[in-house]
């Protein structure tokens, strides 16, 4: 998970991994993805958040309007010039990716292409650089 904010937000200029105290004074917009991580410090931010937005598209609209900052999986953030992602200093803010395949037969070519693309993209975003 990464902190997401508009490019003009003060936290966008921070180059180091962010701490909870960096986010606490900001207007934090909670979302369903960060609410399910079961990290006590994040749970406290979620409980105090003035907004809980369930749709990622709506959440990004609130961010674009300057309503606050949020945490999202890095892959959920659109790649355009309007957003900045900043890493958090906490390894527990990770999700694990699992793919289930049948042992008794190979996946269809389209399914295999999807699996290959998912793993390639996940590898690109690994915190340790792959």
Image (cartoon, rainbow, N blue to C red):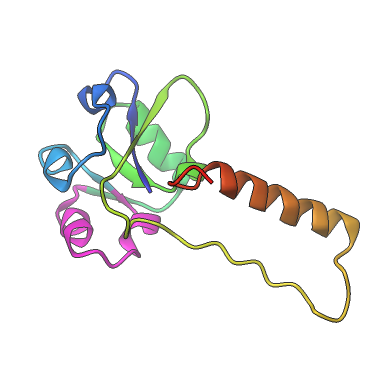
Q: Residue at x 35, y 65 (%)?
A: 36
Q: Position of residue 49 (x, y in %)?
A: 19, 50
Residue 96 horizontal side relative to residue 92, left or right: right
Of the pair 34 and 126, the residue shown nearer to us? 126
Q: Position of residue 43 (x, y in %)?
A: 21, 61
Q: Residue at x 38, y 49 (%)?
A: 1
Q: Residue at x 17, y 41 (%)?
A: 23
Q: Position of residue 118 (x, y in %)?
A: 66, 51
Of the pair 129 and 52, the residue shown nearer to us? 129
Of the pair 33 and 62, the residue shown nearer to us? 33
Residue 14 horizontal side relative to residue 130, left or right: left
Which residue is the extreme one toward the bottom? 104
Give the tally of numbered discs: 0
Specify the segment rendered in magenta. 30-50
Q: Is residue 93 above or below residue 62?
A: below
Q: Residue 22, located in which quarter of the rendered image?
A: top left
Q: Residue 12, located in which quarter of the rendered image?
A: top left
Residue 116 horizontal side relative to residue 104, left or right: left
Q: Residue at x 19, y 64 (%)?
A: 40
Q: Is residue 33 above or below residue 82?
A: below
Q: Is residue 99 above or below residue 110?
A: below
Answer whether residue 42 is magenta in the image. yes
Q: Position of residue 35 (x, y in %)?
A: 31, 60
Q: Main secondary structure of the magenta part?
A: helix
Answer whether residue 69 is magenta in the image. no
């Amino acid at each position: 998970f990464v902190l997401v904010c508009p490019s003009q937000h003060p936290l966008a200029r921070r180059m180091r991994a962010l701490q909870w105290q960096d986010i606490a004074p900001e207007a934090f917009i909670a979302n369903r993805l960060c609410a399910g991580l079961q990290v006590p410090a994040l749970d406290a931010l979620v409980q105090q958040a003035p907004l809980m937005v369930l749709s990622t598209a709506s959440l990004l609209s609130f961010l674009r309007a300057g309503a606050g900052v949020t945490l999202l999986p890095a892959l959920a953030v659109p790649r355009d010039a309007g957003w900045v992602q900043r890493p958090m200093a906490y390894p527990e803010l990770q999700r694990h990716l699992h793919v289930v395949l049948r042992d008794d037969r190979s996946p269809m070519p389209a399914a295999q292409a999807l699996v290959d693309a998912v793993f390639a993209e996940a590898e690109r975003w690994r915190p340790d650089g792959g």
